[in-house]
Amino acid sequence: MAQLLVDYITSLDGYGSAEGWPGLWGMGGPDYFSFLDEDGREDYALLLGATTYRLFARFAETGEEFTDELAARTKYVFSHGLDEPLGLGDSTLVRNDPVAFVRELKQRDRPLRTIGSPTLVRSLLAAGLVDRYRVVVFPVVNGATGADRIYDGWPDVTFADIITRTFDGRLQLFEGTPTRSPSPPDPAADAKV
């Protein structure tokens, strides 16, 4: 069965981008770019919401360097507002229910990933389809300029099998296996530890 990895970048206060700030908040560095290069060599299909797809399509129009690899990758784009043909390489427009579609995709062997796409990720997480969650946190707070809040509308989630890593002395990767929490933990259980 295919695994689904959710991939995010975020500010300390949970924004996926910020108005007027450059990509990666201007803080990408050699360690992080090397990680992205190695990670990009893995075989996986990409799941995208319409807003994230439009963003990547604009990057491709301006000739951003990473978009050649992105265009070549298999992409499933979930939207009722986009029209075919989609212009960014190997892209399939999906108008069906994302949860049912991804549940079917997971029956195959090819790994799946998301990038951004908070609305799509919320629905997949709520349905219990996310196997791993990975976020790289950038040391900036975007209270005034932040956009694309990542965690709004999420259920409560705990993580196990935690992996952490620091890039360039300032970017923090966190990866874990998510489990929905039906209710907050019992404080009495903490007192027994």
Image (cartoon, grey):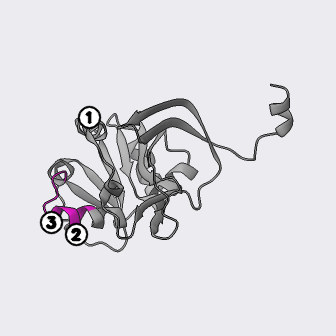
Gap in Å between the C-alphas at discs 1 and 2? 28 Å
Q: Which residue sits furthest front?
A: 169
Gap in Å between the C-alphas at discs 1 and 3? 25 Å
Q: Residue at 39% x, 55% y: name it.
A: 116
Instruction: In this rendered view, identify the residue nearer to me: 126 or 190.
Output: 190
Residue 190 horizontal side relative to residue 82, left or right = right
Labelled disc at residue 144: none
Contact between labelled residues 2 and 1, with CB atoms less than 8 Å apart: no
Q: Which residue sits furthest top?
A: 193
The amino acid type of the residue labelled 2 equals Glu
Q: Viewer-nearest of labels 3 and 2?
A: 3
Task: Name the quadrant of the C terminus.
Answer: top right
Q: Residue at 53% x, 35% y: name it.
A: 177
The amino acid type of the residue labelled 1 equals Glu
Labelled disc at residue 62: 3
Q: Is residue 2 visible?
A: no
Q: Which residue is mark 2?
A: 84
Q: Earlier in the sequence, mark 1 or mark 3?
A: 1
Q: Quadrant of residue 53?
A: bottom left
Q: Which residue is mark 1?
A: 42
Residue 28, percent from left and from top? 30, 47
Residue 59 horizontal side relative to residue 139, left or right = left
Q: Is residue 114 visible?
A: yes
